Image (tube, coloured by chain):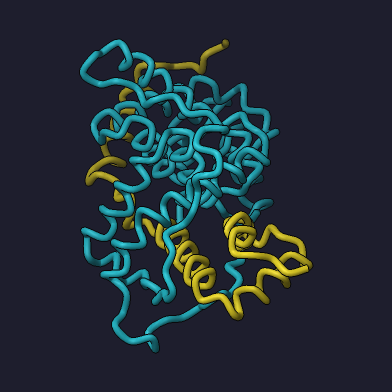
Amino acid sequence: MTGLNQPVNAAVNETAELIARIVAGEKQLFHELIRPVERAVFVMMFMLLRNETDAEDAAQEAFIKVYRNLHNFRGEAKFSTWVLSIARNEGLGWLRKRASRPEDPLDPVFDDSAGRGDFTPALLTDWREVPHEALERKELGQCIRRAIINLPQIYREVVQLRDVDELDVQETANILGITAGAVKVRLHRARAMLQKELVPVLKGYAPSKKEGTSGRRGLFGRRV
Amino acid sequence: MKIDCKHVWEHISAYIDGDVDSVLRAEIDRHLEHCEICSAVMDSTRNVVVLMADDRVFEIPAGYSERLHRRLDTFLTENQGLAND
């Protein structure tokens, strides 16, 4: 969906070649280089800053930093991982600046041990799958977005990278500077919180007949 | 080994990601066969995960890309070289 998950080798070669040409002086190719990560950078900024205007301004600044540092990219990480790390630092910088504005306080601080043990899901005895088509109704997307945005930051970031951008565990860990194990723990808690919050809302969007469901307990083929 | 509901909940996220070993997966599957609550919790969690990946949840503001590339154009025109830091 985000363009971050193209076939690995072809994308890596193409990206490396583009970067080499930009560094050599064909700077207009920078536009082409960043197109696949534009969306993910905006979403990252929006998740951090929770304001569209700030997110857009911060995304522009982040891409300028990416350009300025392009010659430092060594290809040890995927280009998208490297860009998102730079974008996250930029976003965190905006958050710190904002912290000095009393009308816009930072999130309360959460650490990984916060709330340990309180991740009981919403209990129910039947679930009819809500299909993607239900997102044609704008309010459903808004409910899901609000639930994600209201998560504490450490959970919000993991959900963004793993479930919205669909990056793998290791890429997520690299961007956040945490271990793969911590990514899994946070993701588990975040998904439990979201399930609890969203199940009452989503129930209203389920098809009325059970025949409308599909894919029960099937494997998703998601990357771990 | 028979596992209880709480044990299943602890592994829901890993199960959805295919990140549980085959023994545990088989135990969870056996539990899900007869536990309506865990089945519904698993299905609803997976449904939330699937919906979150849809682009329509986080829509990008209209004109975002155009404004970004315009800003970059201005920047690239004004800045001849890459930073050396």
Q: Residue at x 49, y 71 (%)?
A: B37
Residue A86 on image: x %, y %: 51, 26
In this rendering, the count of numbered labels is: 0
Q: Is residue A15 visible?
A: yes
- Along the line of sight, which residue is nearer the eye, B78 or A86? A86
Residue A115 on image: x %, y %: 50, 37
Residue A21 on image: x %, y %: 57, 33
Residue A220 on image: x %, y %: 58, 68
Indicate whether A23 appears above or below A168: above
Chain A colour in the picture: cyan
**Quadrant position of the N terminus of chain A in the picture:** bottom left
Q: Residue at x 62, y 22 (%)?
A: A72
Q: Residue at x 41, y 18 (%)?
A: A93
**Quadrant position of the C terminus of chain A in the picture:** bottom right
Q: Is residue A222 visible?
A: no
Indicate whether A110 appears above or below A79: above
Picture quadrant where residue B44 is located? bottom left
Chain B colour in the picture: yellow
Indicate whether B57 appears above or below A114: below
* For residue A223, side relative to residue A154 (left or right): right
